[in-house]
Amino acid sequence: MSEPHDFTALVIGGSVGGLAAAHELRAVGAEVAVYERSAGETSARGAGIVMQPEVDALLNRLGSDAASVSVELRERQQLDAEGRASRHGAPQLMTAWDTLYRALREPLSGVCHRQDSTLRSVRVSGHEVTAEFADGHSACGNFLVGADGIGSATRMLLDSVTRPEYAGYVAWRGLEPESALPDDLRDLLDDRFTFFTSSGMQMLCYLVPGADGEREKGARRVTWVWYVNVAEPDLPRLLTGRLGTHFAHFVPPGELRSETVEEVRGLADVSLPRPLAELVRLSDVFMQPVFDLAPGRMVADHAALIGDAAGTVRPHTASGTSKAFGDAAGLAAALRGWTPARPLPFYELEHWEIRRLDRFLTLSEAGFDLAVRSTLGAGRGTRFFASDRP
Ligand SMILES: Cc1cc2nc3c(=O)[nH]c(=O)nc-3n(C[C@H](O)[C@H](O)[C@H](O)COP(=O)(O)OP(=O)(O)OC[C@H]3O[C@@H](n4cnc5c(N)ncnc54)[C@H](O)[C@@H]3O)c2cc1C
């Protein structure tokens, strides 16, 4: 017999933030259902994630831990233009989106998790929230959590004005098996968080678990992120995929136009240290422009926003995922003990919102400062990929 539940929560978005919310809400007695827009394989969306305490805390509560889903690095190294390295000890755990996703998804096997479910509208009547999806399906609950990322439909229903703003640079990215790398390149990157910076660009790369979570040498993957300043008028061209599709926030692996891939490789050859240019050349490159989405309200009538749906922080603090987890944990704590027989815990929800907006501001300022120091963003450093270049 299933246990009685205090209330029913509908979680919109089944990425890592949505799954964290599902766990946290279940832990306070909610029955949870997750609705995810993607129809099938979702791993292409993510690459590396720097492990942070909020993620470790949830994994611990699920009977796992950070180390079991991560690769441990020993050092950081800064490469100069010639590829010479300066190094210092800096132990750090690195995981991958798909590894973390699995660690969160598997313990939710008994929970309703509906894919191909794109939220279209939300209605609230008393303590009943009805979510309607593009395929005509509808779901009823008592509280709705918008964990649907930067383009959040939930957010637009709560606040139709605020839109993500392009930050002036993009992230070219790659995720390849380490076994595909030549020995000298693998030796250089092994166990190290590698950085290269020059005007208008910064590249970093590190090892993450293999496609099935393998952590042993030879079976892991290398992920890299290369931030490059690109003027806004040049962005639509780079976001146009090989079949003419215009992507809004992410161009998945295999979808960039071949001309764009050649441009990326050409720029890598002339501006990165040789080993990093080689890494770009042997990767199936994908792309993510960096956007700022300032948070407004995180709570509305029987609904709340978490993670990127609530607001984005620059990736340099490596805290987007941990912010989503922290949002989810605090939201569940605010709803602990609530049942639809009582009024919503407005005081607790408001305090949750204040604390999380405060956390957001701290992370946001830190990320912005790091970007400025690396000459990334509109009006800073050199720009690349100008369509009018000779
Ligand atoms: C270049 C770059 C590098 C980054 N590196 C890191 C890092 O190292 N560490 C880190 O912690 N963070 C990093 N981040 C940030 C991180 O990707 C996000 O902060 C994190 O994934 C937020 O998770 P989320 O669950 O809130 O949103 P998302 O992961 O964006 O998930 C949203 C989900 O909602 C679904 N969805 C969207 N619309 C709908 C709808 N209408 N109906 C139903 N479902 C919907 C989507 O399909 C998706 O599954 C990086 C970001 C960038 C841009």
Image (cartoon, helix red, strand yellow):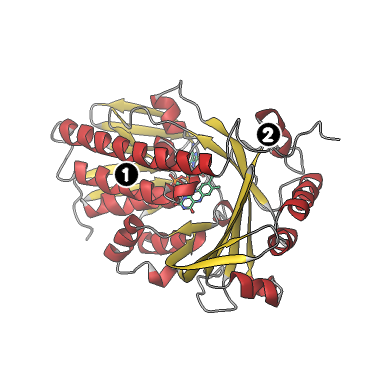
Which residue is labeled 1 in the image?
327
Task: State whether residue 206 is above or below residue 119.
Answer: below
Residue at 52%, 79% in the rendered image: 216
- Is 364 situated left or right of 349 in this image? right
Q: Residue furthest top?
A: 161
Task: State whether residue 49 is above or below residue 87.
Answer: above
Residue 139, percent from left and from top = 38, 38
Q: Nearer the viewer, residue 140 or 271?
A: 271
Task: State whether residue 149 is above or below residue 112.
Answer: above
First along the sequence among labels 2 and 1: 2
- Is 228 situated left or right of 387 in this image? left
Q: Nearer the viewer, residue 167 or 325?
A: 167
Q: Crowdedness of circle 1 by 10 Å Cα count: few (<14), some, many (20+)?
A: many
Question: In the structure shown, which secondary structural element does the residue marked by tag 2 occupy?
Answer: helix
Residue at 36%, 40% in the rendered image: 306
Q: Nearer the viewer, residue 77 or 40?
A: 77
Residue at 86%, 35% in the rendered image: 390
Location of residue 1 (image quadrant): bottom left
Question: Does residue 135 appear in the picture of this structure?
Answer: no
Which residue is labeled 2 in the image?
235
Question: In the structure shown, which secondary structural element does the residue marked by tag 1 occupy?
Answer: helix
Question: Does residue 354 appear in the picture of this structure?
Answer: yes
Q: Crowdedness of circle 2 by 10 Å Cα count: few (<14), some, many (20+)?
A: some
**Mark 1 CB lies closer than 8 A to ligand 1:** no
Q: CA distance from mark 2 to mark 1?
A: 31 Å
- At label 2, which amino acid type do we have? Leu
- Is 248 situated left or right of 106 in this image? right
Residue 63, percent from left and from top = 30, 69
